[in-house]
Image (cartoon, rainbow, N blue to C red):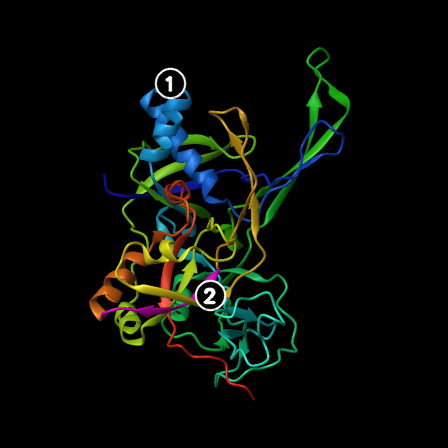
């Protein structure tokens, strides 16, 4: 079955628990991550399929669902007045550094020069990255970062960065901070007296999916599972969301992007969702090669601190192992060796492909990636 796009539109603030304990201790707080990881929406898709099909799930059936239902996403979208996708909001690539003056500085690999294995923990093949000015020369940034720091760019700004990355100002309409947090205080009700239990006071913090002027946001996923539109619970406390099928596809590659990559024989890969890689900050080369006759060399990596997630395994009735993931926005600078047609096929295949090292993580939506241009340019020393 072909992939279809589904919107998950929360009615209430969505609780996406982090790994910190939440128990009966008075004053406990159920905190949320900044954005739902793929495991939340993928679990939601498979749960909806099970309930709608009236299936009974045991360990064998759970494994079958994991291997037969694939999900990609989630991506943040803004809805228009009709409830359709009005704008895509994508994670800011990590090869950027923004200032409070509105300037977005480009990060480029640095000529190794004095950097080497004896001065850093980078291998000899990897170069560190640093900010450059509009001419491509190394620059020292002295201004502060914006507060709050943007987490998302709209599709226009994101695609411009994929095709023509350069140090430049960004419009306020092109950036979005992280989702706001809604904090609520709760009490435990004593069943006998129907009054608040002594000392049983706790808080929950959920993600608000409403922006300025009550603009509504939603999560977009695409999956091959046959689902039905309905209200259902998702995340902590089973907050209500509405599942709706839309005809809008996920973004296609910008014009001439693939042609430029074929000409340059270099490119960048940008993660749209966190990836699970054996080596932490970068994947295995076989994962990037994806069985294409193209030789891949990673020349630099731009990333942020890892995302740590866990979860609950419903089939095993036990916690899932904690995982450290390369966060969304991570950028890989690649050199490609092969004939032009092989590079073209590889670049087309890499667009919206999940590139985690583990195949199950790929089916779960981890490591959704796109490609961008890089012409083997390194930062010039001043």
Q: Which mark is residue 174?
A: 2
Place of residue 57 in the rendered image (x, y in percent of width and height, measured from the top left):
39, 21
Q: Is 59 included in the stretch rendered in magenta?
A: no
Residue at x 41%, y 41% (from the top left corner): 8
Q: Nearer the viewer, residue 287 or 123?
A: 123
- The residue located at (55%, 70%) in the rendering is 97
Q: Which percent across, then down, holds residue 265?
A: 31, 73
**Which residue ends up furthest to the bottom in the rendered image?**
382
User: Total number of numbered labels?
Assistant: 2
Side of 67 where 299 appears, left or right: right
Q: Position of residue 37 (x, y in %)?
A: 49, 45
Q: Is residue 334 magenta?
A: yes
Does residue 131 sit above or below 146 in this rendering?
below
Which callout, 1 or 2, points at the residue further toward the start of the chain? 1
Where residue 351 sits, quadrant-wise, is bottom left
- Furthest residue toward top: 192
**Disc 1, SS:** loop
Q: Which residue is mark 1?
A: 56
Q: Which residues are magenta?
A: 330-339
The residue drawn where x is 36% and y is 51% is: 85
Quadrant location of the N terminus in the rendered image = top left
- For residue 107, side relative to residue 266 (left or right): right
Q: Which of the image's four quarters has the C terminus?
A: bottom right
Residue 266 quadrant: bottom left
């Amino acid at each position: 079955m072909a992939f279809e796009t589904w919107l998950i539109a929360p009615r209430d603030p969505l609780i996406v628990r982090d790994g910190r304990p939440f128990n009966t201790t008075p004053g406990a707080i159920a905190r949320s991550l900044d954005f739902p990881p793929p495991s939340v929406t993928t679990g939601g898709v498979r749960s909806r399929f099970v309930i709608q099909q009236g299936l009974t799930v045991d360990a064998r059936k759970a494994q079958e669902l994991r291997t037969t239902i694939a999900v990609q996403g989630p991506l943040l979208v803004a809805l228009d007045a009709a409830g359709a996708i009005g704008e895509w909001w994508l994670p800011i690539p990590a090869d950027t550094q923004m200032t409070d003056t509105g300037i977005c500085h480009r990060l480029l690999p640095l000529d190794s020069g004095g950097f080497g294995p004896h001065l850093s923990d980078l291998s000899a093949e990897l170069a560190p990255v640093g900010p450059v000015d509009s001419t491509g020369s190394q620059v020292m940034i002295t201004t502060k970062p914006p507060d709050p720091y943007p987490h998302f760019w709209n599709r226009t700004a994101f695609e411009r960065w994929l095709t023509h990355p350069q140090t430049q100002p960004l419009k306020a309409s092109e950036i979005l901070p992280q989702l706001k947090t809604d904090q609520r205080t709760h009490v435990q009700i004593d069943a006998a007296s129907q009054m608040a239990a002594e000392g049983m006071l706790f808080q929950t913090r959920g993600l608000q999916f409403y922006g300025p002027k009550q603009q509504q946001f939603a999560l977009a996923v695409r999956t091959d599972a046959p689902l039905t539109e309905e209200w259902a619970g998702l995340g902590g406390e089973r907050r209500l969301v509405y599942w709706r099928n839309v005809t809008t596809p996920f973004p296609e590659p910008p014009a001439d992007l693939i042609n430029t990559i074929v000409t340059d024989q270099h490119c960048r890969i940008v993660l749209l969702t966190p990836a699970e890689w054996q080596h932490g900050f970068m994947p295995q080369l076989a994962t990037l090669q994806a069985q294409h006759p193209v030789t891949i060399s990673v020349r630099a990596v731009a990333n942020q601190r890892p995302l740590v997630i866990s979860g609950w395994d419903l089939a095993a009735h036990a916690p899932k192992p904690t995982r450290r993931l390369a966060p969304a926005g991570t950028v890989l600078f690649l050199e490609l060796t092969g004939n032009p047609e092989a590079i073209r096929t590889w670049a087309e295949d890499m667009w919206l492909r999940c590139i985690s090292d583990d195949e199950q993580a790929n089916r779960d939506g981890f490591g959704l990636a796109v490609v961008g241009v890089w012409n083997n340019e390194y930062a010039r020393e001043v």
